[in-house]
C-alpha cells in the first residue's frame, strides 16, 4: 500500500513538473496561418489582387498579417479607398503590364512575389523612411514595399514620379539578389557623403560623381538613384549628366549593362512609361 501511495506521489510530481515546463515555454507561432482567408470578407480589391497574382505571379498585400513586418518596424496600412485604385493604376497598369510587354524576361525572372502597400511611410527603429519604403524593407528577394499610398491621386505627375520611386526601391532588391556590378563601389570609394548628403545640391553631387545628392549617401543608394535617374529622365539628359564626371559615366555604363543583362532597357522603359501614363490619365 505504501508503495502504491509513493508511486502515486512520484507520478503526480512528474506530471506537475512537465506541466510547468510546457507552461513556461514560449507559444509556438504557426507562420503558415492564413489570417485573412480568401473566402472571408471579400471585396473588389481582393478580386483584383487575385487577378494580378494569377497573371503576373505577384500578390499585393494591404491587409497586414502578423508575419509581414517584424516587431521593431512601425507602419500605417493604406486606406482601402486609396489601395484599390493604386493597385490598379500603379502596380498593374504602370509597373507590371509595361514590363511584361517590353521586358518579358525581366518580368519572368525579376519581379517579386509580394507587393506591400503602406499608407504613409515605414519607421525602422524610430527612423522614418519617408514616402518610399526604404532599403531596410526592400533589401530582400521576394517582397517590394512602397509607402505614400494614401497620397495616391489620379494625376499624371504624381503617378509618373511615384513609378520612378518604385524602380528605385526595386533596384534595392536586385542589389540584394545579385550584388552591385563588380567594381561599382570602388568608383566613388572614400568620397561618399554619409549623412552630409542633406547639405548637398544635386548639381554639387553631379560634380562629385553622383546623379543626385541622396545618391552620394551610400553605395546602395548611389546604385538605386542611378536607376531612378535613368527611368525618370530622357536618355540625352542622362548622358549629359554622366559626361560631367568620369565617375558618373563609368557608373552609368555599369548600371545600364547590369539591367540589359537582366532583360530590360531602362531608357526604352522610360519612353514607354511616359506614353503609358499619358494614355491612362486624362
Image (spheres, rainbow, N blue to C red):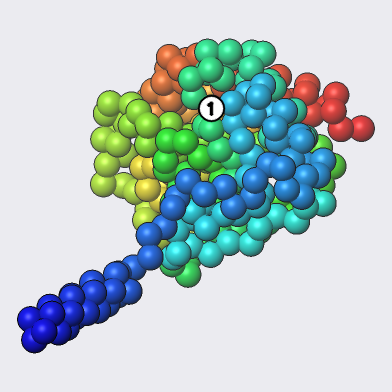
Q: Indicate left or right for 276 with 134 as reference.
A: right
Question: In the displayed structure, would residue 122 be above or below residue 56?
Answer: below
In the current view of this chain or complex, which residue is farthest to the right?
282
Q: Residue furthest left?
A: 3
Q: Nearer the viewer, residue 44 or 94?
A: 44
Give the percent coordinates (x, y) of residue 141.
42, 35
Q: Nearer the viewer, residue 5 or 152?
A: 5
Q: Which residue position holds label 1?
A: 111
Residue that appears at 7% across and 81% down: 3
Question: Which residue sits at x=33%, y=31%?
Answer: 179
Give the crowd class for mark 1: few <14, some 14-19, many >=20 residues within 10 Å: many
41 relative to 111, above or below: below
Residue 270 vs residue 137, the one in the foreground? 137
| Residue at (70% x, 55% y) in the render | 78
Look at the image and tell me whether residue 132 can be seen: no
Quadrant including the N terminus: bottom left
Give the answer, above or below, for where 124 lies relative to 259.
below
**148 shown above or below 184:** below
Query: In which quadrant of the rendered view does residue 12 lie?
Result: bottom left
At mark 1, the secondary structure is loop
Residue 254 in the image: state x and y as whole percent: 39, 23
User: In the rendering, at what x and y percent does residue 197 appear?
Assistant: 45, 55
List x then y, in percent, for residue 51.
Answer: 72, 28
Q: Going by the image, does 47 lie left or right of 38?
A: right
Judge from the rendering whether residue 232 lies leftward or rightward of residue 20; answer left or right: right
Task: Answer yes or no: is residue 97 visible.
Answer: yes
Q: Quadrant of the C terminus?
A: top right
Q: Residue at x 76, y 34 (%)?
A: 48
Q: How many marks?
A: 1
Amino acid at each position: 500500500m505504501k508503495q502504491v501511495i509513493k508511486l502515486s506521489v512520484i507520478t503526480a510530481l512528474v506530471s506537475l513538473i512537465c506541466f510547468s515546463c510546457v507552461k513556461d515555454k514560449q507559444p509556438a507561432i504557426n507562420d503558415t496561418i492564413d489570417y485573412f482567408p480568401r473566402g472571408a470578407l471579400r471585396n473588389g480589391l481582393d478580386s483584383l489582387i487575385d487577378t494580378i497574382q494569377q497573371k503576373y505571379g505577384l500578390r499585393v498585400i494591404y491587409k497586414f498579417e502578423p508575419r509581414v513586418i517584424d516587431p521593431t518596424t512601425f507602419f500605417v496600412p493604406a486606406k482601402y479607398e486609396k489601395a484599390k485604385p493604386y493597385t490598379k493604376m500603379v502596380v498593374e497598369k504602370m509597373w507590371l503590364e509595361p514590363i511584361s510587354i517590353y521586358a518579358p524576361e525581366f518580368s519572368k525572372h525579376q519581379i517579386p512575389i509580394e507587393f506591400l502597400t503602406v499608407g504613409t511611410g515605414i519607421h525602422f527603429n524610430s527612423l522614418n523612411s519617408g514616402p518610399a519604403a526604404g532599403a531596410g524593407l526592400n533589401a530582400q528577394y521576394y517582397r517590394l514595399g512602397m509607402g505614400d499610398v494614401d497620397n495616391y491621386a489620379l494625376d499624371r505627375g504624381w503617378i509618373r514620379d511615384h513609378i520612378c520611386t518604385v524602380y528605385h526601391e526595386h533596384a534595392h532588391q536586385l542589389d540584394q539578389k545579385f550584388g552591385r556590378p563588380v567594381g561599382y563601389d570602388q568608383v566613388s570609394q572614400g568620397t561618399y557623403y554619409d549623412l552630409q548628403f542633406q547639405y548637398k545640391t544635386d548639381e554639387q553631387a553631379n560634380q562629385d560623381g553622383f546623379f543626385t545628392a541622396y545618391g552620394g549617401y551610400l553605395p546602395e543608394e548611389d546604385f538605386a538613384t542611378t536607376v531612378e535617374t535613368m527611368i525618370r529622365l530622357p536618355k540625352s539628359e542622362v548622358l549629359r549628366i554622366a559626361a560631367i564626371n568620369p565617375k558618373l559615366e563609368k557608373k552609368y555604363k555599369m548600371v545600364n549593362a547590369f539591367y540589359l543583362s537582366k532583360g530590360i532597357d531602362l531608357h526604352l522603359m522610360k519612353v514607354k512609361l511616359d506614353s503609358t501614363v499619358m494614355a491612362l490619365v486624362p
